[in-house]
Image (cartoon, rainbow, N blue to C red):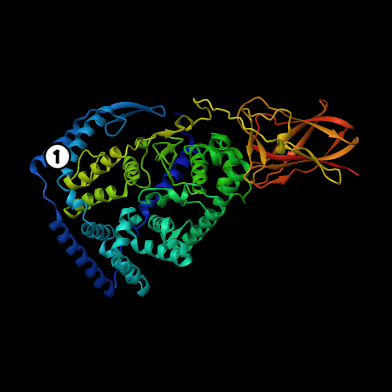
Amino acid sequence: MKKPNLIKNVWIAMILTLSTSVFAVGKSEPISLTPEGRKLEEHYSKMLADLKVEITRLEPKVDEQKRAGFIKQFGALGNVPAVTKTVMGNEVAVKYGPDNPAFVEKQKEVLTAARVVMTDIETFLSGEEALAVMAKFALLTDATPERLAGFAQQGEKEKLLIDGLLNDDNLVVQVMTLGGATGGCYGQAMRNYRAIQEATKRSHEGFFQVWALAVSLQNTGDTYVYPDAPAAESLVKYYLNYLQAYDDGILDPAFSELGGTGWNYRFVFPDSYTLEDIDWIRKVLRNYRPDHTRLEYRWRYCRIVRSDIPYTSGVDRSGMPADLSNIQKFFLEGGICGPRAFVGQISGYAFGIPSRRAPSPGHGAMAHWTPDGWTTVLGPHFYFCSHINGMPPMDFLLASQAQEDPKEFKEALMCEWLGKALAEDAPRDFGSSGGFWRLLGFYKRQAIVEDQKIKDIGATGEELAESNESSEKEEVEEIEISEEFKKITVAGDGTITIPVAACRSPKNGEKIRFMESIDGGMQVHYGLAGRRPELLSYTIEIPQAGRYEFTAHVCSVTMNQEFLLRINRRTLVDVNIPYTKADWMDTEPVVLELKEGRNRISFTQKAPNKGLSIKMFKLKPVN
């Protein structure tokens, strides 16, 4: 790994600040309760105490020999020796987790022992009444009576939000199955949720309801992205924006089918990006690189990092236009790990793909959902990350896998909640230690993964974490272009329109990629890859010799570009490319002297060039 320079250290600090912000939620100054608040706290405390008593009565009997066998097996995990792995150039000792083969094999024995215990508690795990009791206990424990009272004492509306939650067993179960409220802030979560439900009736049913609740539970700060607006108000704006994008067919086709309990919907909204940036990135992918919206899911959308955000250190952004957002600035010159991870994240967020930051020591990367499971991108595997969404990274991965079976996942939660009620220690070191019931819940999750044959799909593009070079050879896929997209036309005023696909040899190469436009036409992208210039050559029949204004219909996301025209193998003409900010726009006209009959015009860009997308060229006679 390269030694981090000062600029890189600044970016790493920013990554850690942004990615650990979840820890700050709910950790504000101590709550000052009013007399009414203290009464409410007593009420919630009694409710919690009564539930705890009820839960302890529900504890099922387990055969002592089976219990002892399970305890003995997981106790031996701590004796598994560590192995050494090379991760991004550094030697790392791996004791726990899937990168230690001996640990994996021993954990299979632990899981076998856990399954033996589970046969004794099947009746307990299938009880719906027990599920509701335990879910409410888990909620009150996580929220704390003091925090609930602090919210409820603010007014009748706030108290009704808490009462409405606690009196609805089905909602309580759903809330806790989705992972509970970030920072234990259930009052704010319910404020968010009810605001979204008031804004649109569609958020009351189906996946729309799950999505509304999940994002409300995830984003429980006083504000969300916009510092001058209440969180609920901002979340409503995001929900309605995404709802419109869903209706317009802009969001990914999988958005309505993220599967499992709905837990993935917690992560479809950005953690720090404005709606302006979200809308802009949608435009970038749809106009500038629509091919990236059709890739297999490991690289879908986030491929824009590999193609357009080169790994470059020492970028000075101080002279860039002040009206550009940071995301827009990253496209101008690229950046190191932080900017690349940020662009990759927002590219998924914009289309409803669940995403998270995935920092590791000295490096910033990202993680996102695919139909085959979560993957880390532009960085090491989950095991080597610092945390994901405030969770130990392997615990995050296991949760993402186990929630794919909602029924069995709830049973795992019941074991964990029972362990909490009995004041057991939480699992540590990926199931190597902890209390009996809480560990049983952990291994119930692993049983789900094994039974459902859910695979860990690993990391994506790790070799590109701090490099522009990939060990994987990128396959260049050819595309069949219909003749209708190659037809040159002449308007009544003599203007000749030349579709970009009308070139002599419309084939894809390192730099040139033909692709379908979002609107159904064709366009070409002339990219950053490769060092040798590539040509697009056109043969045009000119009815009358003379001067013609040449324009190109282009889309760009960078500044200070120009391309080169070669006219009839003799004349060279430079054409300035406007900074279109991902819109489609014509270049400023340049005048060409063309002969009657056949003329050849060739287009190229000099290396090193920046990306450009083109739909057509026009030649308009100069009167």
- Neighbour class for label 1 at 10 Å: few (<14), some, many (≥20)? many
Residue 344 in picture, x, y percent from top left = 50, 41
Work out which quarter of the rendered image holds the C terminus and state it: top right
Identify the residue at horizontal 23%, vertical 33% (top origin).
108
Residue 526 in picture, x, y percent from top left = 65, 34
Indicate the quadrant where residue 600 lies.
Answer: top right
Q: Is residue 75 left or right of residue 499?
A: left
Indicate the quadrant where residue 101 lies.
Answer: top left
Callout 1: SS: helix
Above or below for 127 versus 353: below
Residue 583 in picture, x, y percent from top left = 66, 47
Above or below for 256 versus 38: above
Q: Which residue is mark 1?
A: 71
Above or below for 176 versus 252: below
Identified by mark 1, the residue type is: Ile
Q: Is residue 110 visible?
A: yes
Q: Is residue 563 left or right of residue 34?
A: right
Identify the residue at horizontal 57%, vertical 35% (top origin).
307
For the view shown, which residue lies furthest in the left direction? 64
Q: Quick one: 497 or 551, which is closer to the camera? A: 497
Q: Is residue 380 visible?
A: no
